[in-house]
Amino acid sequence: MTTNTPAVDVQTPPTAPPRENYLNCSKGFKSWALTLDHKRIGLMYLIGVSIAFLSGGMFALLVRLHLWEPEGMLFTNIEYNQIFTLHGAFMVFLFVIPAIPGSLGNIVMPLMVGAKDVALPKLNLLSFYLWLIGAVLAVLAIVLGGFDTGWTFYAPYSLYTDRAVVTIGMAIFILGFSSIFTGLNFIVTVHKLRAPGITWFRMPLFVWAIYATAILQVLATPVLGITVLLVAFERLYNIGIFDPRLGGDPVLFEHFFWFYSHPAVYIMVLPAFGIISELVSVHSRKPLFGYKLIAFSSIAIAIISFLVWGHHMFTSGQSTYALFAFSFLTFFVAIPTAIKEFSWVATVWKGSVALNSPMLYTLAFLIIFAIGGLTGVILGALNVDLHLHDTYFVVAHFHYVMMGSIALAFFAGLHHWWPKMFGVMYNEFQAKIACALIFVGFNATFLPQFVMGSRGMPRRYATYVPEYAPYHQASTIGAMILGTGVAMMVIYLIASLLIRKKAKENQWGGVTLDWIAPTPPPHLNFDHEPKVVHEVYDYSTLDYDSMQRDCN
Amino acid sequence: MSDHTHGDGHAQGELDMGHTHVSSPAMFMTVLLALLFLTFITVAVAQFDFGSANMLIAMGIASVKASLVIAFFMHLKWDTAVNKLMFLSSFLFLSLLFIFTLADQFTRRLDHELHTTNSEPVDGAWVQPAKSDGPH
Amino acid sequence: MSHDDHHAVVIPAPGPEFVPHTVAHHFSTPVQEFQAGKLGFWLFLATEILLFGGLFAAYFYFHELFPETFRVGGEQLDWRLGALNTSVLLLSSWTMAMGVRSAQTSQKSKTMIYLFLTVLGAAGFMVIKFIEYKAKNEHGLICFGHLFDGYDMASGQVSWFKDYDGVMAGVPHGHMFFSIYLTMTAIHGLHVIIGAIAIIYVMRGTAMGRYHAGYYLPVDLVGLYWHLVDLIWIFLFPLLYLVP
């Protein structure tokens, strides 16, 4: 899958001034604030979600510091409740859900399908501004008294607490619509704007993953919208449907909430899968093993994810029959997920593996995700979960998936497409050190949490009995290492923009259209309309010249 | 692009707008009369008590009305396959929300019976009070 | 459909009272633009279905839990007003469909008339809704003046539910039916108002001659939205007024 004569697409006469690209084609605040260019919107998303991630990370470090001592080091219990809620809400709603589709998806997906832009550019900009309004409201909610409900906003506590639940509820409602519009836009783009020759099975797997994610965003998020709206109504005028004092049922809240929030787990993780699928292929210089299996498993995961939400509610008072059904169905998620994991490993197998920083992050993902996924199967078993529910085992499990897998895949993708986005390379040596720090720090943080969770340490407690102190302290040390690694990454990435060491035209030797487009891409992405005649990931078509030549 | 192949013979006017379909006013009028008639039927059958079938009958008639609106007023009958799939799949996923949420609610009574016939309650399971008074 | 030339594709106006339409730069053909808009809007309508779906799920959930409350509550609503409102909405859906048809066939003044009639239908619907709400207010079933007063610990009741006539005295949680009635009809009513504003917006475009056989996408999309508003009411009417 490349153009017939790729070299022609990117050739510039040697005497020409620096070629125009999307970064330098227009200047000034308005040219960014009102841009309809998917790449600029993606960059604004990238800055936004990165700030959200770093704030969420600061809250996490505060939580870990507090738990250094059994009685807690820093906060009162009420303050602690707010800090861990802020960590969860920022990470989930402002970072993990929008991060990959909003930033990398926005920048890379239209390139991969050979489009000039997303199908609905104005909606794309609106979706970014909705994200921004949601973020501002979330910060406003902190000013207005914070919120201490946990990121799940479970009724009835969220109905009774005197904190700013309505404000954060509105923030989530608006963030939800930002997510819906992004997904809607991507579905239309994939359907209507593919370049000639890009059939469904010539689409890179990142596009498949973004497409499956988009289906979830469109179909699941409205239910979250109505749920937070009902919580707001409940607080404003006591409609009573979640309030047990008034005949309502808090379990109904949990049904509504998890109808969204379980698929949301896959809204978060499917784009990460997509990045990993791209990267294992490019950096092993091998076509993906089981392309169609991976593509269909994304769709299968998207659909199965709607059938299993009740496994978050094993101890909340559902009928026993519903418990059986949800536990049984949960195991089915493991099948498509395992298909992916095995296909990635089989792709790396006997490949020409380049151990550069994106690939190191990818390999770290493969290890961490195996642990995160398998502990999920353990938790899906009804009888085991009754013991492990709301312990640190659950915390460790979902951090292995959300932080260890999704954030690492995001970092991997960021390192992979950084030279594409900016035309500059970061310091590879520093990148490898940071990756090692993040990998070691991450495991040091969360492995002890599996142990203490299985021994009964409940989540969300501000204090604990001294027996758990060694685990908590190991976890806190790990978190500091992890924090150091992330800080280092932020520094060398920003430094690369200042040093401006030129990247290669095709830094890693990719053959999908995102690497065929000039680096960095021009405003309309391609100098000529791309026509694809090859199968996807066909490395025999690789233009080695573009790997040697500096980008424009 | 890839969807060009869908542009079949429904186009009207000078420009081929893909799946454009201009319906006749007579058809719209027929649909309107059918909808008004079905509204009358909805009210009429509500005067009789069919027991537990009441809900099924009312929702059945409403579904027929909704189908008329979707197929003819919204032109989905003449729309592309992908638009049909996207819109109608929302009802599929909505039915998942209904089925699982209501299955929980509807089986809680069975749950209650299950637990009261056992000499010991199952750990971790919550017993729903009898249906008539609900949780107070 | 080449990307090479960045010349805009222009759809000519079918007559002097119309203006040509320029296809957006990232689309190659008018068909592509039209179909992208349609697909996007159908997806948006799918999200609306699921948004209301949550409310319907809540309705069925509590209908099962408190059947008597819903039965007696439904009797307090005037089904004649409900049926009238259903007919008004169905009629306005018909005028909307005819309005879209007139735009498709480049009949400018007819489009204006049909769209205006649709807005009139929306206004009529809201007036009847207001009359209904007013009656509920008078009987203390929904006291709008006390809507935000909160929960009264002493009586164990919400402040907006006074039930002056004691009609709901014999059933558990009498306010439950009315809170669901109010929430569903209010959110639906909000959609009616948004729909009316959208129709007025496309009336403006119609008056300027923007929509004709070559380009009528906005009229079409607003029409779809309006039919969705109708679609939801078709289910609300029997569930609230004739509680099965």
Image (cartoon, rainbow, N blue to C red):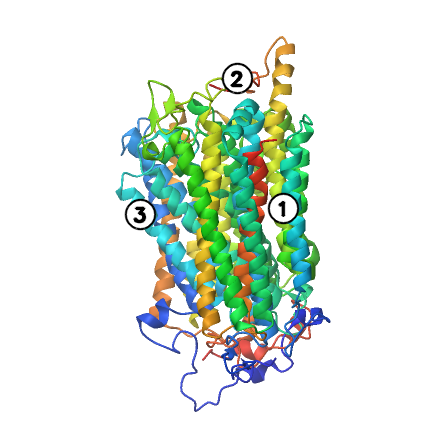
SS for callout 2: loop
Residue at mark 2: chain: B
Pick the residue in front: A202 or C70. C70
Crowding at label 2, few (<14), some or many (≥20) Cα neighbours within 10 Å?
few
Image point (48%, 65%), residue name: A107
Q: Of C87 and B96, which appears nearest the observer? A: C87
Residue C223: quadrant of the picture: bottom right
Local crowd size for mark 1, using a 10 Å CA cut-off: few (<14), some (14–19), many (≥20):
some
Q: Do marks 3 and 2 share a subunit?
A: no
From the image, tell me which residue sits under label 3. Answer: A139
Instruction: Identify the residue shown where x is 56% and y is 26%.
Output: C71
Looking at the rendered image, the quarter that the C terminus of chain C falls into is top right
Q: Badge 1 is on which residue?
A: B91
| Relative to A398, residue B34 above or below | below
Left-right relation of C52 to A78: right
Q: Residue furthest top?
A: B119
Q: Nearer the viewer, mark 3 or mark 1?
A: 1
On the same chain: label 2 and label 1?
yes
Query: Circles 3 and 2: CB distance less than 8 Å?
Result: no
- Which residue carries the number 2 mark? B133
Residue at 54% x, 33% y is C59
CA gap, disc 2 and disc 1:
32 Å
Which secondary structure lies at badge 1?
Answer: helix
Label 3, label 1: how far apart the Cα atoms are? 36 Å
Residue A319 is drawn in which quadrant? top right
Query: In what quadrant of the picture does the N terminus of chain C appear?
Result: bottom right
* Amino acid residing under circle 1: Phe
Q: What chain does mark 1 sit on?
A: B
- Say if mark 2 contacts mark 1, CB within 8 Å: no
